[in-house]
Image (cartoon, helix red, strand yellow):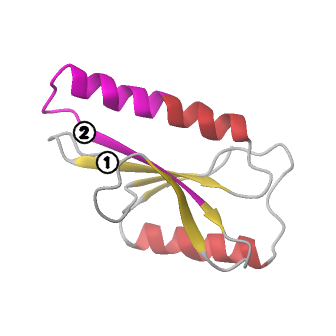
């Protein structure tokens, strides 16, 4: 993660049966940490950008559904897949699209955090 004032984007993936409480429970502290850092005038702390991603109804396209900093296109540095209470996703087309997207983000240098 950048510590020189560069932007770090934390992407949180909303996949079928992912825990919404986990998605929002992760989003809020990251957004607050970024705000507090800005308010304190920190130039060394990374600027945090939080995005949420989901597979569209077509089952093939990933969409950014929330972006806390719309300056430029999203480019995740860290991708978090929150936990689920229902076990792993069914291997259908949306799951395959999500897996392709995760592989692309990893190939672009993003760190992946799998569900636990």
In the rendered structure, does residue 39 fall within the stretch colored magenta? yes
Q: Where is residue 62 in the image (x, y as percent from the top left)?
A: 58, 71
Residue 46, which numbered label? 2
Q: Is mark 1 on a helix, strand or loop?
A: strand
**Tag 1: Cα neighbours inside 10 Å, few (<14), some, or many (≥20)?**
some
Residue that appears at 61% across and 51% down: 81
Residue 56, which numbered label? none
Residue 110 drawn above or below residue 94: above
In the rendered structure, does residue 20 fall within the stretch colored magenta? no
Looking at the picture, tell me which residue is in the foreground, 30 or 111. Answer: 30
Return the disc, 2 or 1, that comes first in the chain's sequence: 1
Quadrant assignment for the N terminus: top left
Residue that appears at 71% across and 44% down: 83
Q: Position of residue 35 (x, y in %)?
A: 32, 28
Residue that appears at 31% across and 22% down: 36
Q: Where is residue 38 in the image (x, y as percent from the top left)?
A: 23, 28
Which region of the structure is painted magenta? 29-53
90 lies left or right of 96: right
All told, the count of numbered labels is: 2
Q: Which residue lies furthest to the front in this view?
A: 70
Residue 72 drawn above or below residue 58: above
Q: What element carries label 2?
A: loop
Asked if the residue at tag 1 contacts the one at tag 2, i.e. Cβ–Cβ closer than 8 Å, the answer is: yes
Quadrant assignment for the C terminus: top right
**Tag 2: Cα neighbours inside 10 Å, few (<14), some, or many (≥20)?**
many
Kindly indicate the quadrant of the structure image that contains residue 16: bottom right
Residue corresponding to mark 1: 8
- What separation in Å lies between label 2 and label 1 (alpha carbons)? 6 Å
Q: Position of residue 78 (x, y in %)?
A: 43, 52
24 lies left or right of 36: right
């Amino acid at each position: 993660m950048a510590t020189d004032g560069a932007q770090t984007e934390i992407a949180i993936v909303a996949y079928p049966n992912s825990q919404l409480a986990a998605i929002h429970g992760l989003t809020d502290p990251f957004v607050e940490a970024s705000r507090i850092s800005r308010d304190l005038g920190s130039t060394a702390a990374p600027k945090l950008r939080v995005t949420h991603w989901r597979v569209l109804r077509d089952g093939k396209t990933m969409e950014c559904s929330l972006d806390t900093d719309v300056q430029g296109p999203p480019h995740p540095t860290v991708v978090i897949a929150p936990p689920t209470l229902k076990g792993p996703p069914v291997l259908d087309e949306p799951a395959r699209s999500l897996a392709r997207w995760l592989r692309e983000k990893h190939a672009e240098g993003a760190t992946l955090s799998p569900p636990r």
